Image: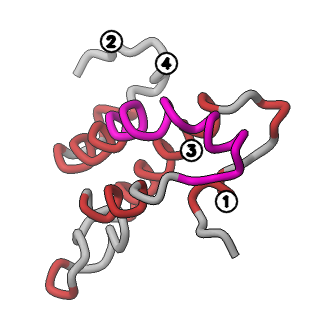
Amino acid sequence: MINTNPFDYFNLDSLLGDDERIIRDSVKEFVAAEILPNIEHHYEAGTQDPELARKMAEMGLFGITIPEEYGGAGANYLSYALVFQKLDMAVSLGVPLDRGNIYLEFFQPNI
């Protein structure tokens, strides 16, 4: 397969299976549509979107590596890593670097 992505120097995308690409692309679209438009507002206000966890659960992102017979998605650990890579993109792109890492604040319930 010819590498057409200038940012994928080692052509790693060609090593992904169809399921892994689907998961990666779905989460990337979710981040762009649901998280990035609101992340700075929630950071500034000290709030979080109460629907975000529900939407992520509907996508099957919680328990993604748990076998299907136990209610999980049955995906492999590479898929798990791809999910978090794309979720981390929201933090990297959504909030200026001088504001620190808000990943735990944004995705964890208030304690």
Q: In the image shown, does 50 or 103 lie closer to the viewer?
A: 50
Amino acid type, residue under disc 1 in the picture: Leu
Residue 4 circle label: 2
Task: Please say if 41 is above or below 77.
Answer: above
Amino acid type, residue under disc 4 in the picture: Phe
- Residue 27 lies in quadrant: top left
Image quarter (top left, top right, bottom left or bottom right) of the C terminus: bottom right
Q: Nearer the viewer, mark 1 or mark 3?
A: 1
- Residue 56 lies in quadrant: bottom left
Q: In the rendered structure, which segment of residues is drawn in magenta?
A: 28-48
Secondary structure, mark 1, is helix
Q: Which residue is mark 3?
A: 88
Q: Nearer the viewer, mark 4 or mark 1?
A: 1
Q: Which residue is mark 1?
A: 104
Q: Nearer the viewer, mark 1 or mark 2?
A: 1
Residue 7 circle label: 4
